[in-house]
């Protein structure tokens, strides 16, 4: 465990070096969050009674989505890992005295946390200073305050576990480009990054909420905003635990199979 923690620390420090990119990301999140809120405001003003979430809940969802974009964004899969698998440089990782699955898992988690750590606080501070109903409000009660961080951690782990599974599947492909495009587009749609899941038709939403994608950013953001509460919130957190365990088992199985069949050419 100590060696994985050391590797996490090294990758985390490496991710903190890109401060200029982080400030550019912060500016982008400010603008994009404001545009999304303005768009939703136009709909709410027209027919406020026909929406499944209150406008304040939607605003909270959007600001947290922008602040923690690096934690849950589908396109945050590392191109360097895909390229190393394709060109054979992954052998350097296989030579380490560490298992490849937890190594890639820890690496992906460190990358996401370091990038989110540089961006989230300016976005949240800016959003908290905005006037209502456009600014970030406090969580919807003490239960949401306590359950939200637990769900955030689980959402991050599910996202990383799914990404690491994709890295494992890449070992069995000629090129990762098609798989990566399919995965990123699917994740963004089904995890609520494009449209919050409550805005989908009821039957479609019920199916989407039991998929692993809904266990990512959808659950913690809706818990904070008050859209998920009580038994429904606990059920959603339970699904997060289920998908985390299943994805980790699948990822480890796929990666173990790849290690047995992998052949590196060259000298």
Image (tube, rainbow, N blue to C red):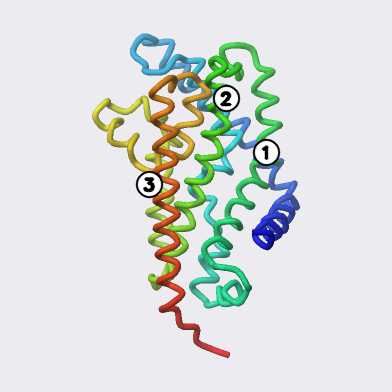
Q: Position of residue 256 (x, y in %)?
A: 44, 69
Which image quadrant is residue 45 in?
top left
Residue found at x 26% / y 32%: 204
Q: Position of residue 57 (x, y in %)?
A: 49, 18
Q: Nearer the viewer, mark 3 or mark 2?
A: 2
Q: Is 23 situated above or below 228?
A: below
Q: CA distance from mark 3 to mark 2?
A: 30 Å
Task: Name which of mark 1 and mark 2 comes first in the sequence.
Answer: 1
Q: Is residue 152 visible?
A: yes
Sequence order check: which comes first, mark 1 or mark 3? 1
Instruction: Classify residue 156 as left or right of residue 123.
Output: left
Labels 3 and 2: the sequence-earlier one: 2
Vertical position of residue 218 compared to residue 20: above or below: above
On screen, 152 above or below 147? Answer: below
Q: Nearer the viewer, mark 1 or mark 2?
A: 2
What residue did someone put label 1 on? 119
Q: Image point 36% across, 9% down: which residue?
A: 49
Label 2: few (<14), some or many (≥20) within 10 Å?
few
Cα distance between the residues tagged 1 and 2: 23 Å
Q: How many marks?
A: 3
Which quadrant: the N terminus? Answer: bottom right
- Nearer the observer, 208 or 258: 258
Helix, strand or loop status at disc 3: helix
**Residue at disc 2, secondary structure:** helix
Which residue is identified by label 3? 186
Quadrant of residue 2 within the rendered picture: bottom right
What is the CA distance from the residue labelled 1 to the residue labelled 3?
A: 25 Å
């Amino acid at each position: 465990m100590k060696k994985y923690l050391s590797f996490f620390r090294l990758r985390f420090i490496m991710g903190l070096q890109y401060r200029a990119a982080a400030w550019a990301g912060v500016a982008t999140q400010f603008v994009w969050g404001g545009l999304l809120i303005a768009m939703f405001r136009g709909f709410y003003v027209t027919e406020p009674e026909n929406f499944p979430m209150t406008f304040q809940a939607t605003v909270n969802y959007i600001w947290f989505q922008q602040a923690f974009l690096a934690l849950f964004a589908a396109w945050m899969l590392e191109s360097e890992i895909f390229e190393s698998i394709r060109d054979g440089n992954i052998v350097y990782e296989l030579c380490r005295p560490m298992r490849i699955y937890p190594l890639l898992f820890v690496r992906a988690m460190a990358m996401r946390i370091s990038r989110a750590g540089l961006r989230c606080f300016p976005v949240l501070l800016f959003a908290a200073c905005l006037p209502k109903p456009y600014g970030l409000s406090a969580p919807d009660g003490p239960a949401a305050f306590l359950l939200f961080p637990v769900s955030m951690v689980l959402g991050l782990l599910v996202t990383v576990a799914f990404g690491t599974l994709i890295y494992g599947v890449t070992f069995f492909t000629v090129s990762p480009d098609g798989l990566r495009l399919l995965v990123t587009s699917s994740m963004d749609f089904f995890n609520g990054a494009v449209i919050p899941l409550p805005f989908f038709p009821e039957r479609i939403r019920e199916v989407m909420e039991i998929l692993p994608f809904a266990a990512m950013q959808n659950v913690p953001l809706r818990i904070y905003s008050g859209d998920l509460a009580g038994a429904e919130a606990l059920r959603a957190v339970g699904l997060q635990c289920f998908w985390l365990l299943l994805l980790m088992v699948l990822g480890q199985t796929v990666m173990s199979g790849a290690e047995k069949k992998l052949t590196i050419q060259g000298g």
